[in-house]
Amino acid sequence: MTGLPEIDDDVPPDTPLTTREGWSAFVRHTPEPPTLLSLKELAAFPPRQQAAHEQLRRDYHADLPLVNTPILQKVISTGRLLVQLNRRQISARRGIVLSSASGTGKTTALTQFGRAHELAVRKRQPDNQTRIPVIYVTVPPAATSRMLAVSSSPGSWGWSSPAATT
């Protein structure tokens, strides 16, 4: 048991991270290496099976984990610190801003932090299947705070919020 919510294992690999299924598949994904065959074993296969095995190897190598670069380490450690500092805050929560040229890994760093955070939460609370510790929201470059507030409201995800009691 991974401690992650039960999500269909047949989630297509291109399912957006902005969906619960896509995010859960991203968090739980661990590349599995294909069986290492000797040249003699591989030569014993018919050509079609050799090609299939070669494709498995390529798929695995295309899906290897990221290199833990200093920037990635900094984002994850700073993110963890901010989560701890914000745990009991009611207002004036601390945040993080990543600003850099396109293609430098900002989204990758944040998704890796989100994955690390969710795995840590699931490890601490394996029996809490209803908790969703990470929500991935994409924000257009010209977004306003109002646009972000609307896109991050539970109603925009198709969830129903509990009825207000008076």
Image (tube, helix red, strand yellow):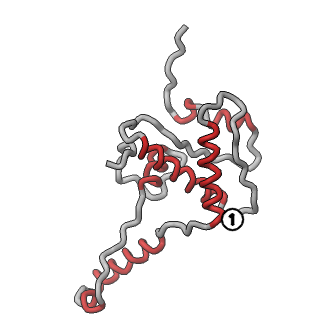
Q: Residue 73's quadrant in the figure?
A: bottom right
Q: Residues within 10 Å of mark 1 (few under 14, many from 20)?
A: few
159, above or below 136, in the image: above
Q: SS for tag 1?
A: loop
Residue 72 spot, x, y in % from top left:
62, 61
Residue displayed at 28% across by 80% down:
49
Residue displayed at 55% across by 42% down:
135
Residue 62 spot, x, y in % from top left:
48, 72
5, above or below 46, in the image: above
Q: Name the residue under label 1.
A: 103
Q: Residue furthest top?
A: 166
Residue displayed at 47% across by 70% down:
64
Tell which of 22 and 113 is nearer to you.
113
Q: Quadrant of the C terminus?
A: top right
Residue 136 spot, x, y in % from top left:
57, 46
Residue displayed at 39% across by 37% down:
129
Q: Residue 84's quadrant in the figure?
A: top right
Looking at the image, residue 38 sits to the left or right of residue 139; the answer is left
Tell me how many marks there are.
1
89, above or below 22, in the image: above
Residue 109 spot, x, y in % from top left:
61, 58
Amino acid type shown at disc 1: Gly
Q: Residue 107's quadrant in the figure?
A: bottom right
